[in-house]
Amino acid sequence: MADVTMPMNGKVLEMKVKIGDGVEEDSEILIIEAMKMELPVVAPSGGIVKEIKAQVGQSYQVGDVLVVVE
């Protein structure tokens, strides 16, 4: 199981996956806004999206778990 975590303090702008989607390593999972930049957050490994903990429009801190890939 791999947790996709927030790389820096910021807000989730767009979710690119839904529960049950298959993802490959380094594929975009979501887009965040941090320090006035839009940044992609990628999957650390391939698998199936099991849980989405983040909500679009919400702010998160470094290390917060956003998505669980199994």
Image (spheres, grey):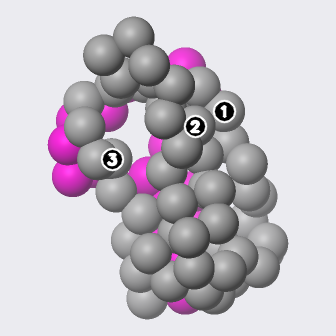
Q: Secondary structure at mark 1?
A: strand
Q: How many marks can you see?
A: 3
CA gap between label 3 and label 2 equals 10 Å
Q: Specify whether residue 2 is in view.
A: yes
Q: Quadrant of the N terminus?
A: bottom left
Q: Is residue 9 above or below residue 64?
A: above
Residue at numbered disc 2: 31
Q: Could you classify mark 2 by the number of other residues whose Cα lies within 10 Å: few (under 14), some (14-19), or many (20 or more)?
A: some
Q: Which residues are magenta?
A: 50-70
Q: Could you classify mark 1 by the number of other residues whose Cα lies within 10 Å: few (under 14), some (14-19), or many (20 or more)?
A: some
> Left or right of 39: which side holds 36?
left
Q: Secondary structure at mark 3?
A: loop
First of labels 2, 1 by sequence position: 1
The circle drawn on residue 14 is: 1
Which quarter of the picture shows residue 15?
A: top right
Q: Residue at x 63, y 87 (%)?
A: 47
- Which residue type does callout 3 highlight? Met
Residue 10: horizontal and vertical position, in percent? 34, 25
Residue at numbered disc 3: 6
Check whether the beta carbons of the residues at disc 2 and disc 1 lie within 8 A of each other. Answer: yes
Magenta stretch contains residue 55: yes
First of labels 3, 2 by sequence position: 3
Q: Residue at x 62, y 56 (%)?
A: 29
In the picture as drawn, the residue positioned furthest to the left comes out as: 62
Magenta stretch contains residue 63: yes
